[in-house]
Image (cartoon, grey):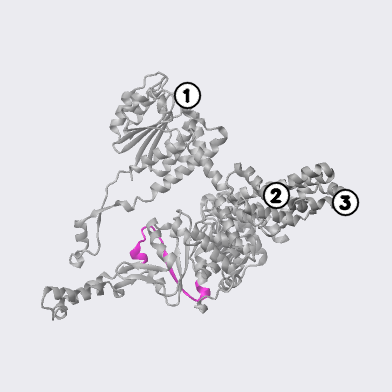
Amino acid sequence: MADTRPTASIEAVEGGLAAQGYIASRQIATAVYLSQQIEKPILVEGPAGVGKTELAKAIAAWRGMKMIRLQCYEGLDEAKALYEWKYAKQLLYTQILKDKLGEVLGGAQTLHAALDQLHTFGDVFFSKEFVEPRPLLQALEQPAGCVLLIDEIDKSDAEFESLLLEILSDFQVTIPELGTVSAVAPPTVILTSNSERDLGDALKRRCLHLHIGFPEQKLEERIVESRVPGISQTLRKQMVSFIHEIRSLDLKKLPSVSEAIDWARVLVLLETNELNHEIVKDTLNVLLKYEADIEAATPQISTFIAKASRQGVFS
Amino acid sequence: MRENLHRFFRAARGAGVRVSPAESIDAMRAVAKIGFTDRAILRDTFLLTLAKTQDEKRALGDCFDLFFSQPEPQQDSSEQSKSDDNDESGANPSADAHGDTSGGAANENIGPLAQMLLSQDRSAISTAVANASGAALLSDIRYFTQRGIFQTRILDAMGIQRLRDDIDELTASNLALAERLQDALNGLRGAVRDAVSQALLLYGREEAENLRNEILRNAPLARIEPRQVEQMRTLIRQIARRLRERYSKPRKRQRRGHLDVRRTLRRNAAWGGVPFLTAWKRKHRDRPKIVALCDVSGSVARVSDFFLLLIHSLHEVVDDVRSFAFSGHLIEVSRILETKSPEEAMKEIMAKVGFGSSDYGNSFADFEDEWMSTVTPQTTVIVLGDARSNNLDPRADILRRIGERSKRLVWLNPEGRMTWGFGDSEMPRYATFCSVVRQCSTAKQLERAVSDIVATYQ
């Protein structure tokens, strides 16, 4: 077990994630560390594009574990998330058994004896053989453990949440016909939510609650640096500071870390060395996704650039 | 340390973070792993394990900072001694001046507290305050009214009785020392008062708030004081949110009815009629349709504010709501309520029809002329008003027709039952045509009434 959990300290977590290109804030690292130590899932909330899903990917890559992803949506149910019976296979076996029925019951003289014989076969159809494991069950069955990402849990129905409770608290599921399946190695579970719907208290209680907001300027600079290596230091400082200014506006959708990275890539592609009004105006649609937002931000561009350049000089 | 953690959990509850036993166990396990050395990491750990929303995280963070700035029992801390400093600094110079000449001999006859105060050992004093706070169960403090009691208890535990006797005795024999002790006592009182205030800040908030809400919930809406109006709004918004949570979720589950045999057979034809996939009949359920008529005339002005707020929240729970406001005549306000924030909407509605003298007959006539068709056999009609029509024709016949057309006609009256029918109240006459008549003068009654209305559609 020890070698699959090399999380000796919070610093080790930070370092490990950083090696995968994920720059974690201290809080994120603490959450990951604790989730290993007390074996609890992490519920990650926060605006879109701040790296909630990325966190799960980074953990999986760093620990060299398989990542199993369950994307939630309205109407997701047991059959799609947990397991399903292989109806067709069961049916096929029934057909075969029908032909062999004579042989099976061969010795039985009375109806009673025949029934007894049949009972011994009854359970065969509802055995592991006929279960089709879906992501949740797969995650429990991984011998080496895995990272289970339950993405956008807020998109699923309230019923589905209740279904998860058993897995989240005890790392096991109960299949009525088979009994309880426990995890071979407890998976690292990450749940993400955009807070579209309030999650139940029962679910929240089973998880560490991590809120990832927009990162601080220094952290975001490091994130951009790690994701877009070719970017010059001046430009990096300026663009991050510019984005922070934009986030202070009242917009429909604030630019997130993923947009910041995209924008950095675009700027590098355009061989920009320094922000100027022209280039910002042309590439603003990378940052802002609504026409109304772009219109609202455009008059501010010059002021923001001026502020950003001053930042670049002094720090 | 374990005791300290428990005190922190209690403080967290006081700050409005719901810490269940399971969560506190998690937090303790987590703390056992990370230790107490790094306060920043400790703070993060509590935020991760205890707080479940952004608001809770903020509250818990503040609580953490406040809690760990407080001295722990049996341990001196700079914070407490600092406050002592402030209290006593004025007294010290004079005390020193007199102390040398007149102290000495008398010191053997005075109690331990007096000796401690005279020795001016601040860390000893603050430790004593902290210990006495523990003995007086200061962390049980809940309401600001208990401040006096706890101050007395702590001072008693420290032996203030003996100190008073000492001062009395010394006043006769050694006036300077008595004065010095009196000053020190005042300083001590200040320190204890600070300790109690901080404890109240830590442990008291939630229950004080609950108490206040409970009082507010049962207070007559018409007699809310201006300073409470904002709190009342918050409370009604909470009620609305609760209604929304309760009634927007379980719809789907209940829709499955009996097995649909025909569809099941057809669907499973491929498996020779073995029913692997089942099909279910869906229960037919009425879509909630609500028509609300709200009196905003002068006589119910205070209450109608809250009525409108509640109707505003109804718009969020139920898709199909038409709302109307009237005093002398009636207008539709659905659009205003849907597109504007509660405050703006109410201002606009009040500006349009509010504060006039009410004319129920005329308003009902307006409704019949233009909007009678919105009432169908699936509609619940809610009338919110005191039924005081200034002795004008009440037009109860229109209300009868509304009642006949609708599924239910609910009348919510902010006046007490005792006054119905007296003066210009037409309530008894109207009541005969209503399916439900309710007194609705407090937030609690309002919540129950709306909850019942929405529940009939579930």
How many numbered callouts? 3
Contact check, label 2 and label 1, Cβ < 8 Å: no
The residue carrying mark 2 is B159
Task: Report helix, strand or loop for mark 3.
Answer: helix
Q: Viewer-proximal residue, A163 or A71?
A: A163
Q: Residue at x 89, y 49 (%)?
A: B101
Question: Which secondary structure, mark 1?
Answer: loop
Q: Are marks 1 and 3 on the same chain?
A: yes
Q: Position of residue A93 (x, y in %)?
A: 22, 75
Left or right: residue A193 versus residue B226 is left
Tell me if B255 is positioned left or right of B71 in this view: left
Vertical placement of residue B168 versus A9, above or below: above
Magenta region: A60-82
Please tell me which of labels 2 and 1 falls first in the chain. 2
Give the alpha-carbon distance from disc 2 to disc 1, as whole Å: 66 Å
Residue lying furthest front in this view?
B109
| A308 in magenta | no
| Numbered circle sitting on residue B356 | 1
Q: Could you tell me which quadrant the N terminus of chain B lies in?
A: bottom right
Report which residue position mark 3 lands on: B100
- Say if the magenta span includes residue A64: yes
Residue kind at label 2, given as amino acid type: Gly
- Front residue (pair B170, B240): B170
Amino acid type of the residue tagged 3 in the rendering: Asp
- The answer to which of B59 and B261 lies nearer the viewer is B59
